[in-house]
Amino acid sequence: MLVKNLWLVLLLSLLSSCGYHLRGAISLPSGLKSIYLDGASPTLRERVKQVIASNDLVLSDTSENTGLIIHVYNEESHRRILSLSAGGAANDFELAYELNYDVLDAKNKVLVQHQTISVKREYFNNQQAIIAKDNEELVIKGEMYKQAVGSMLNGVKIALDMSKK
């Protein structure tokens, strides 16, 4: 029993020392208390709120007394047919999401300017399971938002690290 416990402790310490972290986990600077998100859609705002809550940060309602401002100046979603069946029904779709943003500090100094994040996914549209495919599209869109938010916040982290140097 003691040997099993020692192996478990050793394994856990190796995992923590190798830089392993949960997928989607983003470590933002500890001095940062709040982020203001300007010009974002309600869906993007909700995804950002979910991600930063795990970092003990708050999504502020105003730009006053906030540590960081993310200005979203363009956000677009597209759905495109990739192929058709012999009967003319859509077989494959491509979902695309693009996000353009700037990062400013609390004094409105630009830290990162004109960043673009593009996420694309393809999926097969089974004509026999239309309701299930609608649900699948919602799940895929949710994952696309999650990936875009992760990329954006990683970019913010890099910008903050660079501004401290």
Image (tube, rainbow, N blue to C red):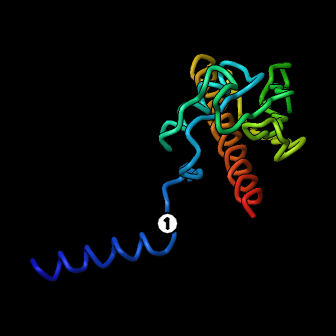
Quadrant of the frame with the C terminus: bottom right
128 w.r.t. 29: above or below: above
4 w.r.t. 136: above or below: below
Which is more toward the observer, 50 or 123? 50
Does 97 sit left or right of 50 as displayed?
right
70 w.r.t. 132: above or below: below
Please, what is the three-letter code of the amino acid marked with disc 1? Tyr
Which is more toward the observer, 141 or 106? 106
Which is more toward the observer, 27 or 20? 27
Which is more toward the observer, 116 or 127? 116
Q: Position of residue 21 (x, y in %)?
A: 49, 60
Does 66 sit left or right of 82 as displayed?
left
Residue drawn 72% across the image and 56% down it = 158
- The quarter holding residue 133 reads top right
Furthest residue in direction right, as rendered: 114
What residue would you read off at disc 1?
Answer: 20
Furthest residue in direction left, as rendered: 1
- The quarter holding residue 119 reads top right
Residue drawn 79% across the image and 39% down it = 104
Residue drawn 65% across the image and 22% down it = 43
Does 116 sit left or right of 33 as displayed?
right
156 w.r.t. 98: above or below: below
Secondary structure beneath dot 1 equals loop
Q: Residues within 10 Å of mark 1 (few under 14, many from 20)?
A: few
Q: Position of residue 85 (x, y in %)?
A: 82, 26
Number of marks drawn: 1
Q: Position of residue 135 (x, y in %)?
A: 58, 22
Residue drawn 86% across the image and 27% down it = 74
Q: Position of residue 143 (x, y in %)?
A: 62, 37
